[in-house]
Amino acid sequence: MKPRAVHQASVGYDYRGAPSPRILHVAQPTDGGVRRYLAAACADQIARGWQVVVACPDGPLAVDLDALGVPRRSWSATRSPGPSIVGETLALSRIVDDIAPDLVHLHSSKAGLVGRLVVRRQRPTIFQPHGWSWLAATSTVKGLTLGWERLASRWSTAIVCVGHDELAAGRDAGIRAPMRVVRNGVDRARFAVAGEAAKSRARRELAEGFTAKIEDLERIGLSRRGVAFAHAVHGGRELRVYVRERDVDDLTVVEMSTDIANQIAEEMTFPGQIKVTVIRAFEATATAN
């Protein structure tokens, strides 16, 4: 492979008269939290006098950036990995060569995948997962996803996490790149501090939502033939289903755990994963006189 030219720092000055960095942000997806975070970050960096360019697909984020006057390069990329990744990698490589950034900041798993394949740490590279990719992956591809993140961490100058739990999850999964916690900022002009009445209402709604989740999990578990009882544990992160030994054989236990997990995935919305454990225990009862 032909090596890239040695990177030269860009010319520019910030509001203090100091040389300003040239930052290339790469984003996919372009909605939700990534959209809001990146638009706010770019506005702040431009106010500091930094040179900012964003590579992203057309969509809501592109509209926001255009309204803010943030320079943008259209980068056609799907949200999930697939055959299109070859063309996406070539397109992003051309953008990186043309912009010649001092630093590349990759947002979310797809941009992190393509961006690290392109840059391979030949330029300082920040990866910000906005939620680890393997937590949302199905069991079929979870191992592959986790393996890639471990490999690609060597091409990350730093990984930015939004909280200590996210950082700990990365460490526990074997991610070895330097990681830092930078919490998402809150626009206090847009989100005022709630009063006690609003806080109480929010706590009540949260408790009601948690109770409904537990009830839905246990309802799904109890809907199968041969189930004696079911209960959710670990704050709703696991459903344990106990079946009657005389009604359910060992093969059915395996099939039942998969069927219940699939029904939960289809009918419920939840972060992370929910483990389903089906238990078939032999019981013997005797009476002492």
Image (cartoon, rainbow, N blue to C red):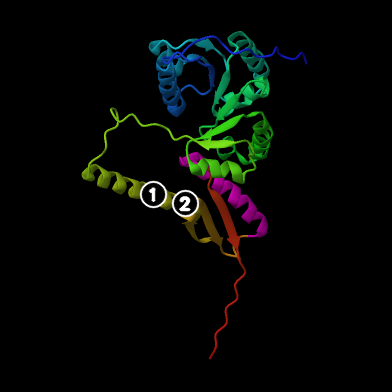
**Coordinates of residue 270 in the picture (x, y in percent):** 47, 42
Nearer the observer, 259 or 79: 79
Can residue 178 be seen by looking at this rendering?
yes
Q: Badge 2: few (under 14), some or many (20 or more) residues near its Cα, within 10 Å?
A: some
Residue drawn 64% across the image and 11% down it: 97
**Coordinates of residue 2 in the picture (x, y in percent):** 77, 13
Q: Are marks 2 and 1 in contact (CB under 8 Å)?
A: yes
First along the sequence among labels 2 and 1: 1
Residues rendered magenta in the picture: 249-271
Q: Amino acid at mark 2?
A: Gly
- Horizontal placement of 188 versus 35: left or right? left
Q: Secondary structure at mark 2?
A: helix
Q: Secondary structure at mark 1?
A: helix
Identify the disc placed on residue 236: 2
Q: How many marks?
A: 2
Residue furthest out toward the front: 17
Q: Which residue is mark 1?
A: 210
The quarter of the image holding the N terminus is top right
Residue 249 against residue 47 in the figure, above or below: below
Residue drawn 52% across the image and 16% down it: 21
Residue drawn 56% across the image and 14% down it: 75
Q: Badge 1: few (under 14), some or many (20 or more) residues near its Cα, within 10 Å?
A: some
Residue 243 against residue 156 in the figure, above or below: below
Q: Amino acid at mark 1?
A: Phe
CA distance for labels 2 and 1: 8 Å
Can residue 262 be seen by looking at this rendering?
no
Nearer the observer, 47 or 276: 47
Residue furthest out toward the right: 1
Nearer the observer, 260 or 14: 14
**Coordinates of residue 49 in the picture (x, y in percent):** 44, 14
